[in-house]
Image (cartoon, rainbow, N blue to C red):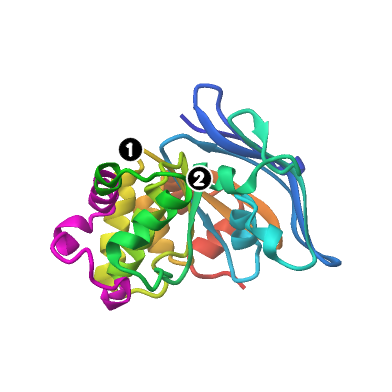
Amino acid sequence: MGIEKTLETNIIRMRPEAEVALKTNDLHVHYGDFEAIKGVSMEFEKNKITSLIGPSGCGKSTYLRSLNRMNDTVPGAKVTGEIIYQGIDVNVPEVDVFEMRKNIGMVFQRPNPFSKSIYENIAFALRRHGMKDKAALDEIVETSLKQAALWDQVKDQLNKSALALSGGQQQRLCIARAIALKPDILLLDEPASALDPISTSQVEETLLELKEKYTIIIVTHNMQQASRISDYTAFFYLGNVIEYDETRKIFTRPKIQQTEDYVSGHFG
């Protein structure tokens, strides 16, 4: 398993034997006249964790948000190119964005639980999508919390406000909320940056378990985190992907000098 790269054209593809969960073709993102993403083509392998790394302002979070069209909500943003999921370009006007986001879920940098009970944080979205059966809701709430490694800590206080949880617990609740809708792909934008080391470790353990069921794409500034949990790593710089390979190669034998400088802390 590996990656084929044509850096001159910024095309990065998995080898044929890999099952691709999501890919972009010549993706550009403009904020007004500023081009934040400059024609990136990437493929993401199913049931793997891919880390997007790079200095602040390099475009990695912009690229991540494009994958489920979160940039649609940004005034002046324009996204061109293809985002292919299950053979469909989800970057066309005809696509039901809300339906698409059931399949491509997102967890943000800071925990953002609803000001509702732990139970309702998960059940609310399910009800919005038409689920009414209490037994079915109970089952999905329990399963989602178990998958997010939170069930044992909260099972006796499901009616407690989610805002009373610790930061790490809130973030795992947000992960549970995202996976309750049974997405195929989970996008995470620096999900542990606001957490203490113990909570960070718990979130990382959760993600490693979740990749058995989900394809995970994560933006992180934490090089140790990328090396610990990801199968693949992409180094972004100035709106381009400079290098994309198996994580162990990126951190031990990078092919591009800029990549080596960044992962070794000598960048800039």
Q: Name the residue under label 2.
A: 102
Q: Which kind of residue does numbered mark 1 sit on?
A: Glu
Q: Residue 176 at what x, y percent from top left? A: 34, 54
Q: Is mark 2 on a helix, strand or loop?
A: helix
Q: Can residue 258 be seen in this view?
A: no
Q: Name the residue under label 1.
A: 212
Lower sequence index among marks 2 and 1: 2
Left or right: 9 in relation to 113: right
Q: Is residue 172 visible?
A: yes
**Which is closer to the viewer, label 2 or label 1?**
2
Q: Which kind of residue does numbered mark 2 sit on?
A: Lys
* First to last magenta residue range: 139-167
225 or 179: nearer the viewer: 179
Queried whether the magenta region covers residue 154, the answer comes back as: yes
Q: Residue 9 carries which label?
A: none
Q: Residue 2 at what x, y percent from top left? A: 50, 32
